[in-house]
Image (cartoon, rainbow, N blue to C red):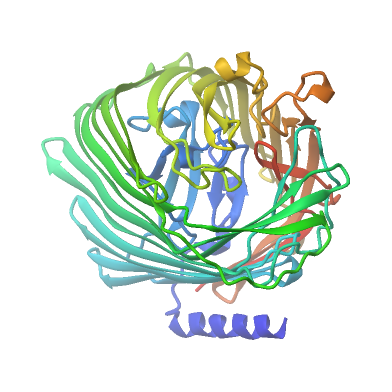
Amino acid sequence: MKRTIRGYSQIAAMALSLAPGHAWAQRAAENAVLAADDAFGTTVGLEVTGIYSENDTRGFSPLKAGNYRLDGIYFDPVATVSGRTKTGAAIRVGHAANDFPFPAPTGIVDAKLRSAGDDFTASLALTRSQFGGDIEELDFRVPVVRDRLSLALGVGHSYSMPSDRTPTRSWSGLFKPVLRWNGGEFSPFFAISRIYDNNPRPLIQVPDGVLPPLPDHLRYLGQTWARGLSTSINTGATLRTTLGGGFSLRAGLFRSSSVRDRNYSEIFAVTAPSGLSRHRFIADPKQDLHSWSGEAQIAWRLGDARVQHRLIAGYRARDRHTETGGSDVRDFGTVTLGELDAEVMPAFTFGAVNVGRVRQSAVMLGYMGTLAGVGQINLGLQRATYRADFLDARSGATTHSRSQAWLYNASAVIELSKALALFAGTQRGLEDSGTAPENAANRNEQLPATRSTQYEGGLRWKQGQSQLKLSMFQIEKPYFSFDATGRFTELGTVRHRGVEASFHGTYFKRLSVLAGAVAMQPRVSGPARDLGLVGPRPAGTPSLYARLDLNYRTDLLGGLTPTASFIWQGNRAVGSRPVVALGGAQQTLPGYGLLDLGLRQQFHIGKIPASFRYVLNNVLDHKAWKVLASNVLQPDDRRRFSLTVAADF
């Protein structure tokens, strides 16, 4: 604790020494609930709210599908985009995606890069969390030449300790010049993250129909010497400029890389209801993942205040290199799950790595039109090309995959009145399927891109400061799960059909309400389902997910604000296969609710705007399993807290 306080004081002193006395709100005013346009998913700084995330939107992952955008520009990340690089992100689905050219079936992760202008700001945020965890963040916006050149700079350090006592330390940094001229902006950036002392969270692999007791949440079950080490770099540049005659250009070129110097996986394969398990350990050799990606769009705007047209021509592409395999797999014998099984670090022997390469591109034509008081239309057509090569280091054989496809999107918004609008749309995409899970025979292997189709429709009602969105949707994609050999491969088709709702509003100028829910019927079909190899439900996808966030600003201490969040997670299948002992049904986990409570306050220290936020998550300390993949579990986080103090100098 003394070490942390001393470090906090040093960072604060540095920020104060650089502050020129002029400030404008940045970190101190962060509030994800107030910043959200809807309840579908919003991230602001360290705060997250909404029913969706970049890893789970309508039961799929837009991040894995390749639907990530940086300032609206296509980006293929193999490294995490840190908080130093972005100010936040939002999930765009349904009506909210209609303003995006070429929307995708799984939704879009709309991330915003940090920028800078003509005002100097130094923002400091300090977070303290359970079991000695801490986060220190320091960001600068530095003007260099007024109206022409400025800098966004940042550095951060994190030490996290979840309830299973798996520690992770990391630091991150950002350097981002912003060059502006009349009608244009060019902004290169370099962002780096170094993750060290990254102990793996153990994976619990269970047989069909068996669910062991949850292990003690305050005990680390892994090996203390298994400290992963990796370096991630995201770099690139964005360009926006007017070209005259109604034409404009938006473009970006990026490189994302992750070098895993040390990477480990620890697996407890349960063999009996008592928790008796086979203890397996996997060490990876040094592996390199990197991707070049980018996009350029030229738009031609026509029309007037009542009728607007936008014609768009563009090109996007990526070239991803992935190394996997070459691992040393150790069997540490049997152990009862929950008991410590400390082992001596072996002298690992690694083999050659497998090499995968994915090249994908698309030529795009689109039209977006708006008729004031009537509605909007969004049309797009793409010719996509996909090429994948995979070199198996053990056999020396190379496999190839080639595909070309016509992709499309069509959506429309019809305004029935100032308050009520109807929405309908469809999209077809060629999307990534992510990588095989860590317990698969083809562990971490890049899965092939697949065609997906989505149909959706709904309404939006807006009155004063309240807004309601209701949507129905259906998405179909190829279904991936484990085959008889343990490979994670395509086994059929999965369809997610559901209804989602979002509501946000402000009442009495004090109470902010953000509420969302999604009710789905995920179903699997195809030959594997017909043969009884897989059941009707995909593993881990809940039938219902809902979240309610409340902020109530009082007059105490100039605006002390109690906060509350209630989350409901519906039942979900543990594994993909039917269980004979359950009459041919799939094993499921029951639904449960979580309650988070907190306090937040904005205040001033002299002329310096500041704030604090305290949150106690999972107040009732509910215990539950989290389904990562078919028959692969981890204990969910138990009761925990965080305290964040932020100031803008």
Q: Residue at x 39, y 46 (%)?
A: 395
Q: Residue at x 25, y 68 (%)?
A: 146
Residue 162: x and y in percent read: 71, 61
Residue 646: x and y in percent read: 59, 68
Residue 494: x and y in percent read: 55, 22
96 up-or-down from 21: above or below: above
Residue at the right extreme of this rendering: 274
Regarding residue 421, the answer to whether it shows in the image is yes
| The quadrant where residue 176 appears | bottom left
Judge left or right: residue 44 versus residue 139.
right
Judge left or right: residue 5 versus residue 169.
right
Regarding residue 123, the answer to whether it shows in the image is no
Residue at the left extreme of this rendering: 245
| The quadrant where residue 335 appears | bottom right
Judge left or right: residue 401 versus residue 348.
left
Q: Residue at x 70, y 28 (%)?
A: 544
Nearest the viewer among 110 and 243 is 110
Judge left or right: residue 208 versus residue 527.
right
Nearest the viewer among 585 and 145 is 585
Residue 32: x and y in percent read: 59, 49
Q: Residue at x 54, y 81 (%)?
A: 11
